[in-house]
Amino acid sequence: MPVPDRPAYLRIAELLRGQIRDGRYPQGARLPTMSELCAEHGVSEIVARQAIALLRGEGLVETRRGGGTIVKVTPPVRRVAMDRYRAVVAKPLAVPATTFTHDQRISWNEYRLDREFTRTGAGAEVAALLEVPPGTEVLRRRFVFHARGEPQQISVNYLPWDVVGGTPVADPANEPWPGGTLAQLAFLGHPPTRVEESVGSRMPTPEEAETLRMTGGVPVLTITRRMLSGPRVMEVCRDIVIPADRVLLDYAIDL
């Protein structure tokens, strides 16, 4: 129950938050105008704006020029943390696909990949994940993944240069590659036998928020991934960055 002596903007925000969560204001619905909030709660416009700013900072609403305050539409994407890899390598691909197109349930024609390739030395953190000395040459690849024209995730991955240097995998013109990194490593004679992921969360950097067209108040999930072929680490992804309001991470363990 609301506490009467709480600041008015907190009480208004709490009421609206509850109405959003119980479905009175579903995704895409317009909230009361500032003048309506002022009249209903007997507050000034400054107080009403503070309440809306709080909800906007929580990622629940967005304010559109000339369109008022709208409950944010956030259709989730299902990402299966383990089976997503198995689904791509379990059988020959009848049509081009990657784990991303599988997650997004999109066709190859609805998939776009922006890429930036750099030959560089591994920093201490990446080197530790690759289990190589710092400074070891690697291919750094930064990708922005688009589904149906909308940016959905960023990833930066690293591959040992002694494996990929001078091969088609090192040529950005060959992206997107059907089957993704899994298929590329298999093509190079190092099919992955193990995938490791660790998941964290944080607020996005300004560049990430702009690239992924994120609204304020929404964190990102950060997934650090390693792909191994036998005992050797063949790829490190540091990190996969996904807006937290667009994804579900599902895990299943057979006992």
Image: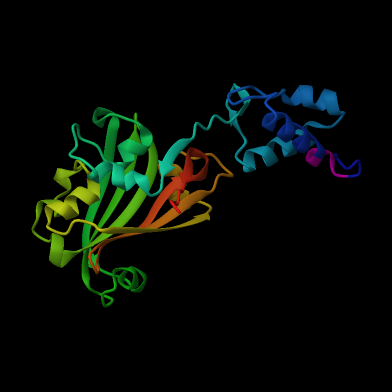
Residues in magenta? 6-10
User: Which residue in the rendered view is the most extreme toward the front?
Assistant: 255
User: Which residue in the rendered view is the most extreme toward the bottom?
Assistant: 133
- The foreground one among 17 and 77 is 77
Which image quarter: residue 135? bottom left
- Is residue 109 shown left or right of residue 202? left
- Is residue 250 shown left or right of residue 29? left
User: Which residue in the rendered view is the most extreme toward the left?
Assistant: 166
Which image quarter: residue 88? top left
Q: Is residue 87 magenta?
A: no
| Residue drawn at (12%, 61%) of the image | 165
Asked if residue 237 can be seen in this view, the reply is no
Where 235 sits versus 4, above or below? below
- The foreground one among 12 and 236 is 236
Q: Position of residue 204 (x, y in %)?
A: 49, 51
Q: Quadrant of the N terminus?
A: top right
Q: Position of residue 128 (x, y in %)?
A: 34, 73
| Residue drawn at (14%, 63%) of the image | 163
